[in-house]
Amino acid sequence: MTGQNAAATTGLRRLREDDLEAAAALSRAVGWPHRLEDWHFGWRLGEGLVAQAAGRVVGTIMAWRFGAEHATLGHVIVAPEAQGQGHGRRLMMAMLDQLGATTSVKLHATAAGQPLYASLGFVPHGGGVWQHQGTASGVGLVPLAEGERLRPAGRGDAALLRRLDMAATGLDRAALLWSLLEVAEGVVLMRGEEPAGFSLLRRFGRGYVAGPVVAPDEAAARSLMVYWIGRHSGQFLRIDLVGDGKLSSWLQESGLVPVEGVIPMWRGSAPPTAGLHCFGLSSQALG
């Protein structure tokens, strides 16, 4: 069954721009912090479906394609009063059908959502992701290694960030990075004359989110994160940290406490990476 036919038989249709206020209301109903502006940002880059009941939106799903073979999936929401009626499964099946059988798809699963995703062929891949957030407090300077420095990142760095991001994620996220550079601040970690990592920060939800954070090792990631913690001390800051351990404990000392964990899952093959690591996500939906 095609995505179009599935939508016709299950009360699903394409997510339109004029649905975004209803989508933002749904996210608030389930306790998500997404602003209307955050929905617009994701909608411009991706594709989505909505579930309708009695003429109103009761569920959403979105996907973002990165290259011809990979995509991420998120914004899977069903209104509290409509849960348990199969809307989530129908949305998932229709979106996977729309993406195509040859597309490998990644998502970040809560404990509640993991059984559904597993039944549709998703399997856990890699370590968990912990959402750290709170009022940032100064943690002091993290000394850079000899020969390292941070410099501002701008739109002229789009190709550079694409290359670094591909090495860390295996995905071609050029459109996402370009859109982030239009609304975000950024810094590049230099080792001598060679760029070794970067991080971006933008308005999101209740305050700011730092991500993606791409670095060769934990020490470099800490330097890229503390830059934003120092710049935004006393303000609400969020980092979706890939992995835990030392960086998680350190973020807690800076006022960013872990509030929720999710599990990366893939349906299909994850792409290979090349020497860099993504320590912080741009968002759980976009990766």
Image (cartoon, rainbow, N blue to C red):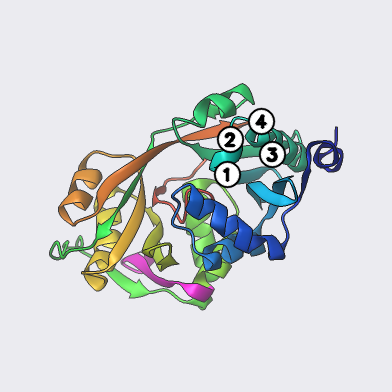
Residue tagged 2 = 83
Q: CA distance from mark 3 to mark 4?
A: 9 Å
Cβ–Cβ below 8 Å for labels 1 and 2?
Answer: yes
Task: Kindly identify the amino acid type of the residue bearing the numbered disc 4.
Answer: Gly
Vertical order, 48 against 266 (above or below): below
Cβ–Cβ below 8 Å for labels 3 and 2?
Answer: no
Vertical order, 53 against 166 (above or below): above
Q: Relative to residue 160, is residue 9 drawn left or right?
A: right
Task: Kindly identify the amino acid type of the residue bearing the numbered disc 3.
Answer: Leu
**Between 175 and 137, the one nearer to me in the picture:** 137
Q: Position of residue 80 (x, y in %)?
A: 54, 41
Q: Residue at x 85, y 41 (%)?
A: 8
**Is residue 162 in view?**
yes
Q: CA distance from mark 1 to mark 4?
A: 12 Å
Q: Is residue 220 magenta?
A: no
Residue tagged 1 = 79
**Between 13 and 271, the one nearer to me in the picture:** 13
Q: Which mark is residue 91?
A: 3
Q: Position of residue 285 (x, y in %)?
A: 53, 49
Q: Relative to residue 52, is residue 127 drawn left or right?
A: left
Quarter where residue 267 is shown: top right
Q: How dense is the environment of label 2, judged by Cα within 10 Å: few (below 14), some, or many (20 and up)?
A: few
Q: CA distance from mark 4 to mark 2?
A: 7 Å
Span highlighted in magenta in the image: 182-194
As helix, strand or loop, the secondary structure at mark 4 comes to loop
Quarter where residue 9 is shown: top right
Task: Kindly identify the amino acid type of the residue bearing the numbered disc 1.
Answer: Ala
Q: Residue at x 24, y 45 (%)?
A: 248
Vertical order, 66 against 152 (above or below): above
